[in-house]
Image (cartoon, rainbow, N blue to C red):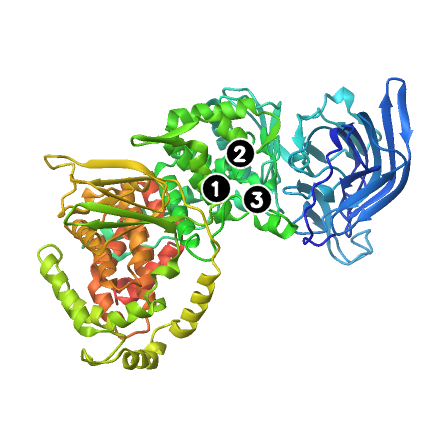
Amino acid sequence: MSKRDYPLVPLPRIALPRHYNVDLDLTEFYGVVDWPRIRGNLSILLEAFGNATDDELLFNAGTNIFIQRIRLYRQTEFGKVVVEIKSVKRHIEREFVRLILGERLSVGWYWLYIEFNTRICQSELEGTHCFPGPLLSSDPKESSSPLPSRQLATGFSTKFEPNFARTFFPGWDDPSIRSTFNLSVQHFSDTNILFNTSPLPNKQNVSTSNLIKLTRFETTPPMPLYLFAIATGPFKPIQVVTTKTNLSLNIWSNNQDLLAAHFVANFSPIMFDKLQEDFNVKYPLSKLDIFITPKYPVGGMENWGLIILHSDNVRISNSDSTLPINDDFIDSSKEEKIKEQKNIQRQNLIEIDKLAEKYKIEKLITHELIHQWFGNLVSIWNWEELWLSEGFTSYFVFDFLNAHNHPQLTEHEYYLKLIELINQQSTDGRSSLIKLITNSKQLDRLFDSIQLYTKGAVVVKMLKDLVGPEVFRTSIARFLRENSFQSVDRRSLWTAFPTNADHGADTIRLKDVMETWLLNKGIPEVEVKRNYEDKSIKLEQQQADKNRHLIYLDDDKMGRMRLNKRFKRMWQMEEEEEEDEIKKDEDINGILHWMLDGLEENNTTSTATTSTTRKEIKRKENNIKNVHLTTKKRQLRAERKKLPKYNLWSIPFSYSFGSVKSKNGQILRQFWLINETIRFVDIGLNKDQYLLANPHWVYSYRVNYDILNWRMIITQLNKNHLEIPSMSRIQLIVDSEYFLRESPHPHLFVQLLSYLSKEHELGVLLVGLDALHSFLELFSASEVFGSLIVHLLPVILQLDKQLVIAANEGTDPEVAALWLLNPLRLAKLYQLRCSANLGTCAEHKQVN
């Protein structure tokens, strides 16, 4: 097998394949222990365009393919004319074959014949994936095999995305090149063969002996080579028919996965009908097979007409719940009632676990079903445009399951993934959604769960929010209908959508907006600075960069922050402004004094020099877990100097102010932010009103505010958090962690977290749990840790209470299952319990 590290060189397009006749012999595969192989013959119909300048023909073939014979004919009205092949050259590293011809190709049709044999299943990640059969014995009396004990290969399935088809048979392995295929397979009579299309009627399939059978399949629609798929093995089907379309849908599995196959069979037809109805484009094949295999490199593959799923990803476990039972919150003093409530909790928790497991399986199935339209019916032109397939598919998984099955789980998982995305895209790991792919390693890394699937889904949701749900739906149907059986780039998408996008009073070209979000690395952050005297507002956008907001990277801020008198004055002013609105714990002054004064046991005077303070901090910095300021500062500064230049984003900016309960109501402003900086006056915004940007967290940009606006928002959260939409509360937690936690104003972050003791919406609380755990972990080895725990104890108790409520009778399992979207959250809560010395610390009880 070739090494996955070579330049990707496009094949010349002087002649392209229009049809493949593929004849395979699998009789040498079954029962082979080592080096399984297949034999085959190809006849490929080529269309030449007459622009050849060289007398050569190139196509792809992996190093595991052995070409035994090759011939080329020119098709004429009188028959086939031989074209001389002077030599055949193999380019091992680049995985292609070069035919040196005796003449240049002219306009017309050619037939290329190749006889080959292939060693398959040579890699855990590429191409063909064999699964084992019965175990052979090393005892000659018990087995006819003289070999040591090992398992025979009894079946295989294929995964050719992105460019592994070349490891199965020679061809043009390029997503932009579509061809039709005919397949015939010689195989043992007791095994099943699955292909993209249905087998031809039995009279066209013949048995060459009692043991061997020849199966032929219907011609496929035009499709890229990577969607060509085969599966074989001793599996049996569950046959179902879709209700609205009467499509034959078969689920194939072994006996061990029969339960999983029944779940897939019950869910898939219903979702398939919903997809076809919503997309308003008919599925073009006569059947759809779903093959559940015990061995596969990924969770699933969307091959047209033959979806392949890894059995590990569709099994429903029989284990008990991972959520704990907590006696402390059982509302009964009678032992018999406690026992009865425990039994109820046990059943509820098992139901919640099953719901979470089924949700994961439904996501996988829905993802592969959507690909039958996005990725198969309409394919991408090149791998740089992979977001057109995976981004739309990932978004529609959330969209369809939200509308029909799991509104709570899908909405909160979307924002969970969004948080993961913006955190990554605010670091040096940021990337653009569309990037140049020049070698095989870059192509392999392209399939990233965050930078491709999540970021693609976020961009698609933005597209929907800009044009509106009805226009979006109509445009999607137009895109699929007008580009069926084609490979396209994003220009075809913009053609199917409206030319302009409206946001507020201004109109801008939709393509121009979206291109900034596709091509720019990372995500934007917008800083909002208000002048409270003249009511002016300044907005500034820039590429999000976490290093910019880490105070220990800024010597000036560090020096100012170490001047105790200044900090004391700042804190006194805050107390005077907010003492009527936010009740502070008695220890908060001491906590924040420590946080800002570098672990000094005694207050330094205002005359303490910056250099002296630095020495004091440097002697004590090892008391903070995993913080090495000097080294880290030097590294991050060096990295920041290497950041590439970037363009601005076209940001659909919006903000609101005022209360819906007030006389004037709530005011919403919307406009485009396309410049780096703008300044304007809003005479309707009073200086005692907070401004909330990006209400409901509709678009994926960060927002930072001036300190006074942050204070007013935090005051509102502690006073009545319901005045702020739930998704905005999530964004405030996420952005405050990013902008305030390690800024000169960490006390504001503590105050914001404090409001969570009043929060009852579980999705918001769980995001708060992540922020709280991360914050406390930062100071876990410091002397201030205990004081922080005391101050934030009400928040920990609220989280603990919500976990138990999840198990109570009457709780919506859909809401309770939010805990399981990220199982690490349970471990985080356990750690917080123990840090706070709660009685539940020692009670990490699992349901038995």
Amino acid identity at mark 3 = Ser
**Circle number at residue 311:** 3
| Residue at screen point 67% across, 27% down | 222
Closer-to-camera residue (795/166): 166
| Residue at screen point 61% across, 46% down | 294
Amino acid identity at mark 1 = Leu
Q: Position of residue 818 (x, y in %)?
A: 35, 46
Q: Are marks 2 and 1 in contact (CB under 8 Å)?
A: yes
Q: Is residue 270 visible?
A: yes
Around disc 3, counting alpha carbons within 10 Å, would you say few (fewer than 14), some (14 to 19), or many (20 or more)?
A: many
Which residue carries the number 2 mark? 490
Closer-to-camera residue (182/429): 429
Q: Is residue 273 visible?
A: no
Which residue carries the number 1 mark? 518
Closer-to-camera residue (471/717): 471
Marks 2 and 1, how far apart in space? 10 Å
**Helix or strand or loop: what does disc 2 sit on?**
helix
**Quarter in which the C terminus is drawn:** bottom left
Question: In which quadrant of the rendered view does residue 48 lie?
Answer: top right
Mark before the other along the chain sequence, 3 or 1: 3
Is residue 86 left or right of 338 when viewed as pictured? right
Mark before the other along the chain sequence, 3 or 2: 3
Marks 3 and 2, how far apart in space? 34 Å
